[in-house]
Amino acid sequence: MRYHAPATLEDATQLLGSDLGDCRILAGGTDLLVRMRSGFAEPDNILDIKRIDGMRDITAEDGGWRLGAAVSGAEMGEHAGLTADWPGVVEAAGLIGSTQIQGRCTVVGNLCNASPAADSVPALVAARATARIAGPNGTRDIPVEDVPTGPGKTSLAKDEFVASVFLPARPDTSGDAYLRFIPRTEMDIAVVGCGLSLTLDGDGTCTDARVALGAVGPKVIIVEDAAKALMGTKVDEAALDALAAACSAAATPIADKRGTVEFRTHVSGVLAKRAAKIAASRAGA
Amino acid sequence: MRKIHVSTKINGDPTEFLCEPDETLLDVLRDQLGMTGSKEGCGTGDCGACSVTVNGRLVCSCLVLGAEAEGAEVATIEGMAEGDQLHPLQRHFIENAALQCGICTPGILVAAKSLLEHNPDPTEEETRYWLAGNLCRCTGYDKIIRAVMAAGKEMREAS
Ligand SMILES: Cc1cc2nc3c(=O)[nH]c(=O)nc-3n(C[C@H](O)[C@H](O)[C@H](O)COP(=O)(O)OP(=O)(O)OC[C@H]3O[C@@H](n4cnc5c(N)ncnc54)[C@H](O)[C@@H]3O)c2cc1C
Ligand code: FES
Ligand code: FES
């Protein structure tokens, strides 16, 4: 195996495109090194992106925030401006692992690892975040939900990687939240996760909403009926019940030792309802 | 495999080593540098026995490559006492009997020191959450938490 730590995006994509065999991107390594250790990944090359210029920056851009692909969960949580604008995204990233894992893990690694239960992904999808993909011909932007295509698989070409994610601007009267269900209080994999972002107008009527479920399908599920259930309402009990019903209807979970199909289906609705209440209160309702 | 030459600082001392590209920082510390204070409990980020700080960030050294330490400042349990002078955390661990077999202890001490640097006056709940990635099979955690709280108090009063 060889270890590469290029200093520019161009050097990185050139390396990926060259004929050096299988190459894995290393961000925080909290998935990759675990997989290598257990023999599930045996790459010929590792490309550490942490020394590439700008990769560790959180930058204000067009009223939103751009997060370099190597920004850790801990760095997100310590950033006051980002936390004020996207508390749900920050709390979702903050749920990943322990303090030690937070010091290393990235939301882009969480996204590209393509686990159906990844905690930050429903929150990023609810936020309408986009991923900036670096490749041999420069960069292109795609919605984050188009990065993972199924468990462990992404849409990225061999010579591409994610350089940053962008959280767009939204009106001040907006809020977001992420909740997951786990059997313990810390350090566990989501049985169900729900990310939700909404905007209210001056009199508290919901004018925009986006709801995403994790761990109840092979990839994140965007529940459009759930968003419709909130829009035009004052996020009252009736709207919340309709939201919950839409989420339960959209969930397509498997049964395993951590939860049955029935349980996950029900909890999808419960979490969406609770997340909507938190998001609405953050929006100033 | 071609070995990689790495220059780093460990507990304040400039240090150089050669490592395999897939060798972890934990293996480098233990097998090459003879710093066996950091323990391997799991090798997969779950137990925290290998905790060190890299550039001031608490991490699991089993999930860091040795090569990533180039130019970094690493702090391990070996740097905690000053000569014969134990760190207040180390003293309170002994006084509170916060260890039995001791395998988890170096990692917990490094993690607790990092907590008190970030938050000199943590609540018990904050302390428990911060240390949630440090597993102990012996003590039942209560004595550990009490020792950390007591050390924090002493350090606040001293400063
Ligand atoms: C103890 C422990 C607890 C955990 N708890 C949780 C949890 O609660 N919730 C959760 O969701 N996850 C959890 N995880 C999994 C992991 O920490 C997260 O998925 C994390 O976000 C991965 O980020 P990373 O930067 O460490 O990724 P890495 O391991 O560096 O990379 C992950 C994968 O994505 C690829 N990749 C990384 N960056 C890029 C990029 N920029 N472009 C293209 N591909 C890229 C890598 O090649 C690799 O295949 C846990 C892991 C451990 C060890
Ligand atoms: S040995 Fe590193 S976390 Fe267990
Ligand atoms: S004292 Fe034995 S594991 Fe903690």
Image (tube, rainbow, N blue to C red):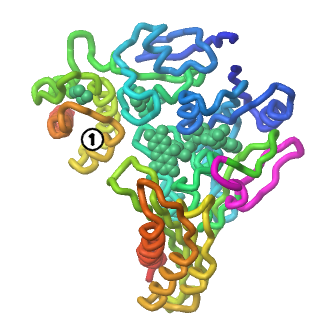
Residue B97 lies left or right of residue A152; in this view the side is left
Q: Is residue A262 in view from this perspective?
A: yes
- Secondary structure at badge 1 equals loop
Residue B120 lies left or right of residue A40; in this view the side is left
- Name the residue at 44% across, 73% down: A266
In this orientation, which residue lies closer to the viewer: A113 or B88?
A113
* Dominant secondary structure (helix, strand or loop) of the stretch shown in magenta: strand
| Rendering quarter of residue A50 | top right
Magenta-span inclusion, residue A253: no
Q: Is residue A102 in view from this perspective?
A: no
Q: Is residue A3 above or below residue A108?
A: above
The residue at which mark 1 appears reads as: B120
Rendering coords of residue A224 (x, y %): 63, 78
Rendering coords of residue A129 (x, y %): 65, 62
Q: Is residue A204 above or below residue A250?
A: below
What span is in magenta?
A131-152
Rendering coords of residue A69 (x, y %): 65, 45
Picture quarter with ligand 3: top left
- Name the residue at 70% across, 30% down: A47
